[in-house]
Amino acid sequence: MSPAILALHITAILLSIGGQFLLKAGALSFRAIALGDLADKFWVIVLNPFIWGGLSLYGISAAGYIVVLSRAPLSIAAPLISVSYIFTVVGGAFFFGEPLPPLRLVGVFLIMMGVVLVVNAK
């Protein structure tokens, strides 16, 4: 993968992570929604700026990822997305006060090691 495509891939991953955080912020701006209440809350969800921001970042991220897929092996590009799990777990704890138990940290470490192995495999 060329440095330019790697940079685009990292940017797409970061945009996706930003989208996750915005969607979570949007979801926290209203009470928990039961599946049966989805129709009643439709406009509350649709008009939420955090939701729009999150979906927009997802869209931009997807466009960048499509470019990456056109120039890089899927067997490398797809596993690299796993890096987003690391940042969302840590970001969830930092921004939203979510618990970060030791076993979850072990899981994040194993994901990191898996990405390193996949990317460096010849």
Image (cartoon, rainbow, N blue to C red):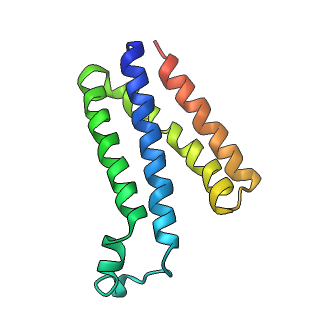
Q: How many marks?
A: 0
Q: Is residue 34 above or below residue 113?
A: below
Residue extending furthest toward the left:
70
Vertical placement of residue 60 versus 114, above or below: below
Percent of width and height locating residue 98: 66, 62
Query: Is 78 displayed left or right of 43 in the figure?
Result: right
Is residue 80 toward the left or the right of residue 61 in the image?
Answer: right
Q: Residue at x 38, y 70 (%)?
A: 48
Q: Residue at x 30, y 79 (%)?
A: 42
Q: Nearer the viewer, residue 53 or 82?
A: 53
Residue 31 coordinates in the image, percent (x, y): 50, 82
- Give the image quarter of residue 122: top left
Image coords of residue 51 (percent x, y)? 39, 63
**Residue found at x 65% / y 48%:** 90
Q: Is residue 22 left or right of residue 5?
A: right
Front in this rendered view, residue 119 or 33: 33
- State which quadrant residue 39 falls in: bottom left
Above or below: residue 98 compared with residue 45: above
For the N terminus, the quadrant is: top left
